[in-house]
Image (cartoon, rainbow, N blue to C red):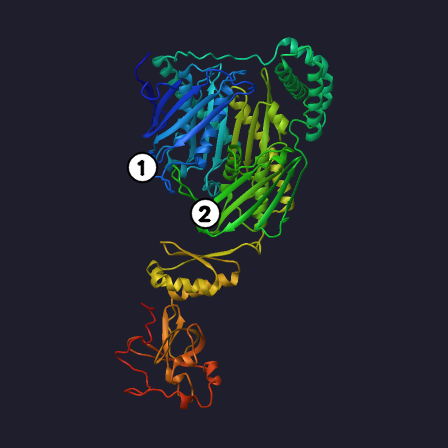
Amino acid sequence: MSGIHSVELQIGEPLVKFETGRLAKLADGAVLASIGETTITVAVTAASSVREGTDFFPLTVDIEERMYAAGKIPGGFFRREGKASEKATLTCRLMDRPLRPCFPDGFRNDVHVVAIVNGVDMENPYDILAINAASAALMLSGIPFQGPVGAVRIAHLKGEWVANPTWEQGEQATFEMVVAGRRSADDGVDVLMVEAGATEISMELVAEGEAEITEAVVADGLEFAKDAILDVIEMQEDLVDLAGVKEQKKKFIIATEYGDDVFAKVAELAKADILKAINISGKAEREMTLDEIGTKVKEGLAEEFADRAGEVKAAIRKLTKTLIRSRIVDDGVRIDGRGLSDIRQISAEVGIIPRVHGTGLFNRGETQVLSTVTLGMLKMEQQLDDLGMQDHKRYMHHYNFPPFSTGETGFMRGPKRREIGHGALAERALLPVIPDSEVFPYALRVVSEVMSSNGSTSMASVCASSLCMMDAGVPLRAPVAGIAMGLINEGDKFVTLTDILGAEDGYGDMDFKVAGTASMITALQLDTKITGIPTEVLAAALNQARDARLYILGKIAEVLDGPRAELNPNSPRVIAIKIPIEKIGEVIGPKGKRINEIVALTGVQIDIEDDGTVRIGAVEQSAADEARRMIEEVANPKIPEPGERFMGRVVKIVDFGAFVNLTGGTDGLVHISKLGGEIRLARVEDVLSEGDTLEVEVTEIDSRGKISLTPVTLPPRVAELPDDYEAKNPRQSRPGGDRPRRDGDRDRGRRPAGRR
């Protein structure tokens, strides 16, 4: 049916609306969707034919963040949007993960999903809306799609789960979870994807007993999400009923990967050899043996199936997958001989790279990750330019996956979506235990380098990163460990695996990553390859993961049972002090003169915030302490009293004397007549220069606060004056002689309140 059609429903607090028929009419399917006033357009198209040689499903998901959506003009020289932000990249992954399992096996046409963010109301995030709008557009398109898929974000707020929380509610919550799923056969929900994490405030509230983030709480959240998921699924079904599915002129073919005759022949030739090969525990040896078996089978069947080499290849993979899965389900024995809940051998080290601020090396079986942490001033935190509410990020976690980690060659041209996603997962897992900036005034960057990969490098990154930060002396609230769980589903049997290998991920049905401390879950990520998993199966997997997490935390404690008491000697020293707001100008000085003097003399870095917080960063603690002393002298000056002595610095020389800084902004005058002892000086510059230090005594403070000083010892250069100095340098007398002038003198000693 032509025309504009729309449906709307309140889910949680905001109103959700889907509309089709207004925009992008040449796309196979398009939806204009909104939540509150956040608006997004999603269009989907499919290629009319399959690219030659394509043996996988080529799904591409793109997010286009338009800065006009938030009333902004893009930054940078060109003033237009460029490379996708990290937030946009993560949203693309969030959309892809629940959509991909819902296309039929053997579908090989290119499918492109494009979401354009048209407007943001700065209250409602757009990412969940994008998943639901993409599903709706696919349902309308006529493209083979086994949807609809519904998604919802829920937040644990004051002990209750809330659907579709606003940005503000999310900041107050202790845990947020994105859940996507399909309608199950019994009108329930089978879960397709979970992305979850604790918030920055969660660890403190859990420690105080005001909140809990346990496996039971998360399981309750999965149940709570079902109603909202079913609501958004029904909205999509209603929209399809109103608009009808678009008539397609494109021909979509669901290819059969191999014929029964090919599979039977492959099984006859290879089954016995593959059964032996999958008993090899070493990844490299096992894969090389399987490759040799595959090559032998393909050569043996090359003549009989001359035009069906692709089917032979697919049949070999299917046979391998079937044998691995049946061994696990029927015998409870995994590829490397472990039981279902066994964890591979674990080892760890710290401090192996001498010059960095902290290092942690974590090994689990053949998976190995090296993490390092770098500490810096808070001004080094990342500035964000996207459509989210957060405009800066103090803790940054970057994950690198070089080709050698899998024994392969490849190109290294910057982080790919997977690397960005894994870094974000590790960052989310550790964020709740990062100390507040008031306690630990540093920006932190952790880099996880995957040295060897055979399953769950992202969770190994979490473990290695806990180690490297504790090695650096970062006062983590608690160490965090992570574990990856797998699943084999055959019929009505669901077998959960602890600490999955790479092959078990590839041949299995679920990759479920769980990270947390001993007392709480900090992050979850679930991906499936089947069209949904019952929530009770996931709840059981959570409990199984907890046992593994506690075991790994015990192994971490054997290496370091807590953060080191002192920062690494190579780390910068950052201290924070508070000064009165009205003193900020005096600390900075005219045109930054005073603050620049402090930096030049001590070699520190100084940041001053509008609330009077001053952060001082230095390579050595002594330099930071000296800068703090100088700042506090200006901000909280000590009032000099007659008879007090100071080691001061000459800050200005005039023809009648030298001004010496006593404390902060308080200067006094040493008259020229007091600087030469018995020698009558012609010029102050003959014995002093600006920047010299001189011990002085306060001799007088007049009614206006002007300070007169007397040197305790004469400047060293007085002794170097020649015997005929006075004869060759007669001083010009002036009315009043050499005594200090009083009222009306310019540049006289200044008030204790500071220079103006």
Q: Quadrant of residue 644?
A: bottom left
**Neighbour tally class for label 1: few under 14, some 14-19, many 20 plus, Cα within 10 Å:** few
Position of 462 with respect to 756 (left or right) is: right
The answer to whether residue 646 is visible is yes
In the depicted structure, whether residue 597 falls above or below residue 291? below
In the depicted structure, whether residue 331 falls above or below residue 116? above
* Badge 1 amino acid: Gly
The answer to whether residue 230 is visible is no
Mark number, residue 463 = none
Mark number, residue 71 = 1
Residue 528, image x, y percentages: 54, 24
Q: Which residue is mark 2?
A: 381
In the depicted structure, whether residue 564 falls above or below residue 64? below
Q: Secondary structure at mark 1?
A: loop
N-terminal of the pair, mark 2 or mark 1, is: 1
* Badge 2 amino acid: Glu
Q: Are marks 2 and 1 in contact (CB under 8 Å)?
A: no
Give 388 or 341, whichever is nearer the viewer. 388
Instruction: Farthest residue to the left: give it.
Output: 744
Locate the C terminus and report the quarter of the image it occupies. bottom left
Which residue is at a point 37% across and 42% down the rendered structure image? 75
Instruction: Farthest residue to the top: give it.
Output: 261
Residue 681, image x, y percentages: 39, 85
Locate the N terminus and report the quarter of the image it occupies. top left
